[in-house]
Amino acid sequence: MQVILIQDVDNLGGSTELVTVKNGYARNYLIPKKLAIEATPSNLKQLDEKLKVKAKKEAAMLAEINKVIAVLKESAIKVGAKTGTSGKIFGSVTTLQIARAIRDQKGYEIDRKRISIVEEVKELGTYKAILDFGGSNTHEIEFEVVGE
């Protein structure tokens, strides 16, 4: 029997996937637990429409991400930090400081949880950070630590 999975099922498939399973497994487990629905022509048509809408949203989101990345790669983001006389930073630069610098300098609000710093920042200079927009959308940006 063919069913359309509503949720991810271990060792079977992901959400909105069309899979073939035994009749008993579908009728006694998947359908009663609302993990799948029967693959009738009307359900297949609804699945097709849902996938088209999802693809359209993903394309729009990817275009927006590419626009943000293009703006961020134009120039390095400057992050201010208090330093001693030798150029060492008091403390270190955090993802929160980078997120605020992006917001203030470029006008884009990026969640600090999506930013990861490649190496520990303890001195003035140029460093790299990785922005993770989910899935395979990760991009590397540069930021410059300057003394305040």
Image (cartoon, grey):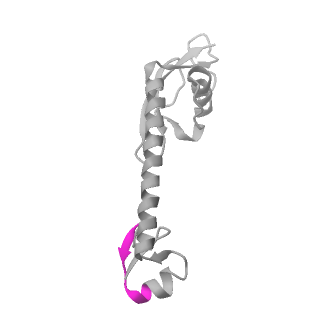
| Magenta-drawn segment | 16-25
Instruction: Name the residue rendered at 46%, 33% in the picture.
Output: 118
- Relative to the observer, which residue lies in front, 57 or 123? 57
Residue 98 relative to residue 139: left or right:
right
Q: Is residue 132 above or below residue 70?
A: below
Image quadrant occupied by the C terminus: top right
Q: Quadrant of residue 20?
A: bottom left
Instruction: Tell me which residue sits at (47%, 67%) in the image.
Output: 8
Quarter of the rendering occupied by the N terminus: bottom left
The residue drawn where x is 43% and y is 33% is 66
Quarter-of-image position of residue 3 = bottom left
Residue 88: x and y in percent read: 57, 18
- Report the residue at 46% width, 53% height from top: 54
Say if the magenta span includes residue 17: yes
Against 3, is 144 above or below?
Answer: above
Q: Position of residue 76 (x, y in %)?
A: 48, 19
Which residue is most to the top? 85
Q: Nearer the viewer, residue 81 or 108?
A: 108
Q: Residue 104 or 59: which is nearer the viewer?
A: 59
Residue 24 included in the magenta stretch of the image: yes
Residue 1 visible at all: yes
